[in-house]
Amino acid sequence: MTLSPFTIALIGVIGLLGIGFYGLMISRNLIKIVVALQIMVKGALLGLVAAGNANGQIGLGQSMALTVIVADTIVAVMGIALGVQIRRRLGSLDVRDLSSLRG
Amino acid sequence: MLTLLLVAILLIFAIQAIRARALITSALWLAGVSALSSVLFYSYGAHLVAVIELSVGAGLVTVLFVFAINIAGDDAIQAQSVPPWTLVTALVALFVLLLGWFVLGVPVVAPVSPVAEAPLSVILWQARGLDLMVQVVLIFSGVLGLLGLLAEAEAPLKGSMAAEVAARRDREMQTLDSQILQIEDVRK
């Protein structure tokens, strides 16, 4: 059985999305959560590029991937800045320490 | 075969980025994921995206991560998940199975006739012009948000909020102790 390049890319997409989702579920560190988000976005980018390649519209796939890269970078920068601020204010990066409501 | 090998190494790097205890190690594994994915993009014909991913994903974002970890410190939080492990495993398995069933079952729609695609610049500036406007707005809003956060960081902080709350509690407890001692003295 030979796998086509598109199928190989789809396996990579599923793997990256699954690993990123697992990281989102188990991580309590804010910066680690941003890392998991980045991994998921890499999976989405690979899917866009592979779909563009398979359909013969690689330019369209590239233009969409560019938009995703810009949005992903903004999300990463804002997440890191928020993490640094929370560390300065609360002294911890643990998401469980963020809860200030008691009840 | 080479593509399959690249995807396998990419997945191993991604797993290491999640598994690594130290944040700096995790950021470096993530840079490896970005570099390998840019090689994959190049092999799929997306040359421009490959270059941008290599410079932004493996360069800029990694530098930002290292900068933030230097400021915030490399806290070694034990890898205990907030939800139970069984629930996490079940949810991730369900997610991967559903995604695989949905994605791998979709047939590839091949182009009916080989049509010469317009150059990328034409697609970007004419067909996807609205996307470019959204990107410009995103970049401006990101820069403004970052400036707001960093400007707030310049305000002098006397210490962490948790330490202040603990010190206030200590002072209140000392006051209560002294009041109790005074009442006992009066009774005697």
Image (cartoon, coloured by chain):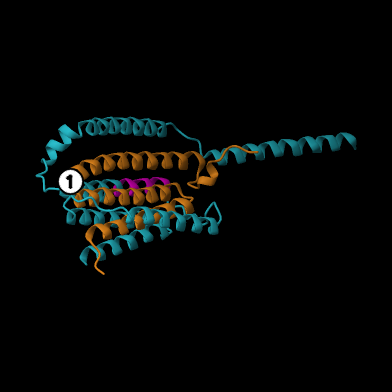
Chain colours: A orange, B cyan
Q: Is residue B120 left or right of residue B171?
A: left
The kind of residue on which mark 1 rests is Gln
x, y (%) of residue B170? Answer: 66, 40
| Residue, disc 1 | A57
Q: Is residue B25 visible?
A: no
Q: Residue furthest right?
A: B188
Image quadrant where one finds the C terminus of chain B: top right
Q: Nearer the viewer, residue B67 or A72?
A: A72
Q: Is residue B129 left or right of residue B10?
A: left
Q: Residue furthest bottom?
A: A1
- Host chain of mark 1: A
Q: Nearer the viewer, residue B81 or B113?
A: B113
Q: Nearer the viewer, residue B128 or A87?
A: B128
Neighbour tally class for label 1: few under 14, some 14-19, many 20 plus, Cα within 10 Å: some
Q: Is residue B55 visible?
A: yes
Determine if the magenta segment contains residue B70: yes
Above or below, B99 relative to A80: below
Give the extent of the magenta segment.
B62-73
Quadrant in which residue A76 is drawn? top left
SS at mark 1 in the image: loop
Residue drawn at x 15%, y 50% as measured from the top left: B47
x, y (%) of residue A50? Answer: 23, 52
Quadrant in which residue B97 is drawn? bottom left
Residue drawn at x 33%, y 55% as measured from the top left: B105
Residue drawn at x 47%, y 35% as measured from the top left: B157
x, y (%) of residue A68? Answer: 28, 42
